[in-house]
Image (spheres, rainbow, N blue to C red):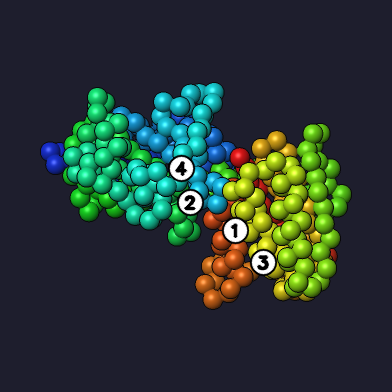
């Protein structure tokens, strides 16, 4: 949870010390009895960052479509009622996309950034911006987005300030992961799940045969093409499904059932196996030596949210992608 120490900057050298974000509206970004969804997280985070010393504008970017594009919002796109998002190319040559791709901060005065980002710096002319800091959002040691601050006062960006900015990225990343998991889990028994009115559903039974992974991939790709899902989202969904089906076949050693549900802009894909409680189809994410655990780390990095649930007759794993 984000700390509650006040923001303060020593004078006269512009150094930030003891930096911690504290939500300016509604208390802390998360609490034991109330979690924010992603839009609320973005609204509170942007309002809070705009209160940092010397900052006049802030922005947030979250990867989508397998990391090829970013969902972006900024201070001027938010209000009490809504958060307005737009899409930007993840390979646009701007500090924020570089920070997300490399996992390293990009900080400097405009004149220092001009050689590397001439178009970006040109767009800042005529504004009050004199310096920019683009910082990765990090959760469980993985980059899951980024934030950018536009300063109207000169900054040193020394080692201490960069460290504090990095810690803010870690705090925000942890809160984002909580926000992405706010929505209720789908029912464990996918065969009896009733989709909401207007939702589209497709199901497939997968044999207990490693060769069946290919059939599962083809099924989902064909289904999403029929539903008009874009290629980037389809590629991400098929890759994640492949990991989940492979886990089910290897660990549970039984057949499994796939269910895909398109409900508005949310695509939910569920894999249900018939394994015993002693043969879970998921493994701890913090074990770097488990190959299929790394596969689940890949899923975690690509989807909006995912979760697994075991019961007396098997394991259900599901993920959601939102456009």
Q: Is residue 32 left or right of residue 121?
A: right
Disc marking residue 89: 4
Spatial distance from mark 3 to mark 1, Cα to Cα? Answer: 12 Å
Which of the two discs, 3 and 1, labels the residue nearer the N terminus? 3
Spatial distance from mark 4 to mark 3, Cα to Cα? Answer: 33 Å
The quadrant where residue 147 appears: top left
Disc marking residue 299: 1
Q: Is residue 293 above or below residue 53?
A: below
Disc marking residue 282: 3
Q: Quadrant of the C terminus?
A: top right
Disc marking residue 144: 2
- SS at mark 4? strand
The extreme bottom residue here reads: 289
Marker count (numbered) = 4
Q: Is residue 283 above or below residue 225?
A: below
Which of the two discs, 4 and 1, labels the residue nearer the N terminus? 4
């Amino acid at each position: 949870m984000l700390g509650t120490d006040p923001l303060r900057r020593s004078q006269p050298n512009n150094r930030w010390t003891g930096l911690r974000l504290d939500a300016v509206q509604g208390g802390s970004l998360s609490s034991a009895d109330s979690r924010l969804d992603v839009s609320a997280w973005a609204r509170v985070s942007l309002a809070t960052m705009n209160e940092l010393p010397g900052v006049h504008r802030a922005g947030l970017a979250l990867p989508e479509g397998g990391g090829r594009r970013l969902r972006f919002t900024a201070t001027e796109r938010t209000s009490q009622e809504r958060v307005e998002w737009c899409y930007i190319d993840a390979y646009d040559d701007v500090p924020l996309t570089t920070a997300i791709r490399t996992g390293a901060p990009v900080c400097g005065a405009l004149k220092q950034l001009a050689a590397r980002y001439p178009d970006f710096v040109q767009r800042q002319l005529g504004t009050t911006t004199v310096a920019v800091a683009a910082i990765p959002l990090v959760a469980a040691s993985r980059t899951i987005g980024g934030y950018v601050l536009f300063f109207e006062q000169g900054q040193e960006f020394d080692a201490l300030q960069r460290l504090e900015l990095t810690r803010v990225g870690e705090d925000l990343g942890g809160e984002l992961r909580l926000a992405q998991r706010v929505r209720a889990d789908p029912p464990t028994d996918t065969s009896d799940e009733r989709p909401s009115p207007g939702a589209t559903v497709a199901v497939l039974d997968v044999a207990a045969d490693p060769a069946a992974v290919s059939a599962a991939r083809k099924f989902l790709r064909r289904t999403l093409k029929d539903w008009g899902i874009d290629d980037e989202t389809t590629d991400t969904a098929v890759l994640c499904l492949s990991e989940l089906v492979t886990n089910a076949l290897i660990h549970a050693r039984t057949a499994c059932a796939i269910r895909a549900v398109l409900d508005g802009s949310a695509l939910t894909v569920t894999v249900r196996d018939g394994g015993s409680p002693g043969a879970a189809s998921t493994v701890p994410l913090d074990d770097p030596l488990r190959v299929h655990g790394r596969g689940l780390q890949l899923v975690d990095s690509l989807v909006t949210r995912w979760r697994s649930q075991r019961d007396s007759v098997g394991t259900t794993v599901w993920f959601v992608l939102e456009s």
